[in-house]
């Protein structure tokens, strides 16, 4: 895949700091802070092994405190819940953008299966990973 295609032409954070807008040509994707926070690329989410991940809840009201580029390869996003290690490389951001509908539905389905709601405070659950590759083929 052409790496230049993965680099957004424009990046905008809304004034309420809840939505990051990424423009790729004529396509504009609006990624909420909640969506980005629950899909943060870290061991906090992926768990310690390939068979488990941590399912985050209570991120509905999170906002992006800071968003800034890190080198030429990523955006660093610091969130209002204190999480400040969110490095989203361009490829991952593009993937989150184009697969947003699939990934968001998968997240909501996993919450439902775990018996928790998006607003349930301080609840994390270890769950089996559903392969994103499998979701992409759907």
Image (cartoon, rainbow, N blue to C red):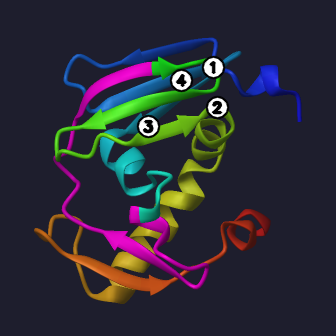
Q: Look at mark 4 in the image and give the residue it sits on.
A: 22
Q: Look at mark 2 in the image and give the residue it sits on.
A: 90
Q: Residues within 10 Å of mark 2 (few under 14, many from 20)?
A: some
- Proximity of marks 1 and 2: CB atoms separated by less than 8 Å: yes
Name the residue located 34 percent from the left edge and 77 percent from the top edge: 111
Q: Residues within 10 Å of mark 3 (few under 14, many from 20)?
A: some
Residue 59, horizontal then vertical, whole percent: 23, 55
Mark 4 and mark 2: span between their CA atoms?
A: 11 Å
Q: Reading the chain from its start, which is encountered first: label 4 or label 1?
A: 1
- Proximity of marks 4 and 3: CB atoms separated by less than 8 Å: yes
Q: Which residues are magenta?
A: 44-68
Q: Look at mark 3 in the image and give the residue it sits on.
A: 31
Mark 2 and mark 3: span between their CA atoms?
A: 14 Å
Q: Name the image quarter holding the C terminus.
A: bottom right
Residue 133, horizontal then vertical, whole percent: 74, 67
Q: Reading the chain from its start, which is encountered first: label 1 or label 3?
A: 1
Q: Reading the chain from its start, which is encountered first: label 2 or label 3?
A: 3
Res 8 label = 1
Name the residue located 13 percent from the left edge and 69 percent from the top edge: 122
- Comparing labels 4 and 2, the label whose residue is closer to the camera: 2
SS at circle 1:
loop
User: Does the magenta-highlighted stretch encompass residue 45?
Assistant: yes
């Amino acid at each position: 895949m052409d790496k230049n295609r993965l680099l957004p032409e424009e990046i905008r954070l809304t004034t309420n700091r809840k939505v990051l807008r990424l423009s790729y040509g004529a396509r504009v994707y609006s990624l909420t802070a909640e969506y980005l926070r629950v899909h943060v690329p870290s061991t906090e989410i992926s768990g310690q092994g390939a068979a488990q991940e941590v399912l985050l809840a209570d991120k509905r009201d999170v906002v992006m405190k800071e968003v800034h580029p890190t080198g030429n390869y990523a955006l660093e996003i610091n969130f209002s819940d204190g999480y400040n290690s969110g490095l989203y490389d361009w490829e991952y951001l593009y993937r989150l953008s184009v697969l947003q509908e699939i990934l968001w539905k998968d997240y909501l389905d996993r919450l439902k299966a775990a018996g928790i709601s998006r607003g349930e405070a301080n609840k994390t659950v270890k769950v089996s990973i559903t392969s994103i590759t499998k979701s992409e083929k759907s």
